[in-house]
Image (cartoon, rainbow, N blue to C red):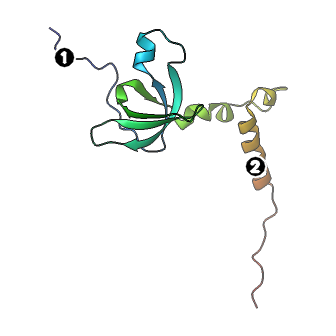
Amino acid sequence: MRTGIERTVPAVTFRSGDIVLYRDPEMFWTGKPGHTFVCKVTYSWTSGTYDLLALASGRVIRYVRPDYMRLLPPIDAMRDIDTASLHVDGAADAMTAAAMAWLAQQHATANAEPKLPAPRD
């Protein structure tokens, strides 16, 4: 016998600054487009709800229940860098611009000549 609302996902506590996928339930259930988008958690209320900032539009969404949020872990955002096969021709072409910039920075840092601190008087 079922009682109450069943959770399909374990409870998650989000922190300010977390990047999440948010699904607007009213837009979703009424069939409107654009109901799911990427947000940043800006505030955590003691009631267990959150304020979000929609990253693409800059819209603030207040008092969001965590049931409609999913954490977007950094590992997923960085997967193309972590799994890039740079030894294959054309592999770098498939990487995002951000991934290429990060790799260039790492390469420059790794290949820089070590410098001694300036002499003191």
Give left or right: position of 14 versus 117.
left
Q: Residue 2: x, y in percent?
A: 17, 10
Q: Residue 7: x, y in percent?
A: 29, 20
Which residue position is annotated with label 1? 4
The kind of residue on which mark 1 rests is: Gly
Q: CA distance from mark 2 to mark 1?
A: 52 Å
Q: Earlier in the sequence, mark 2 or mark 1?
A: 1
Look at the image and tell me in which quarter the C terminus lies. Answer: bottom right
Q: Residue 1: x, y in percent?
A: 14, 8
Element under disc 1: loop
Q: Residue at x 62, y 32 (%)?
A: 79
The kind of residue on which mark 2 rests is: Gln
Give the camera-side residue of 46 and 71.
Answer: 46
- Residue at the extreme bottom: 121
Q: Residue at x 40, y 43 (%)?
A: 43
Element under disc 2: helix
Q: Is residue 68 above or below residue 59?
A: above
Q: Residue 73: x, y in percent?
A: 51, 34
Which residue position is annotated with label 2? 105
Give left or right: position of 63 versus 73.
left
- Which quadrant of the view contains residue 104? top right
Q: Residue at x 81, y 59 (%)?
A: 112
Give left or right: position of 40 versus 121.
left
Number of on-image labels? 2
Tag of residue 16: none
Q: Is residue 76 above or below residue 29?
A: below
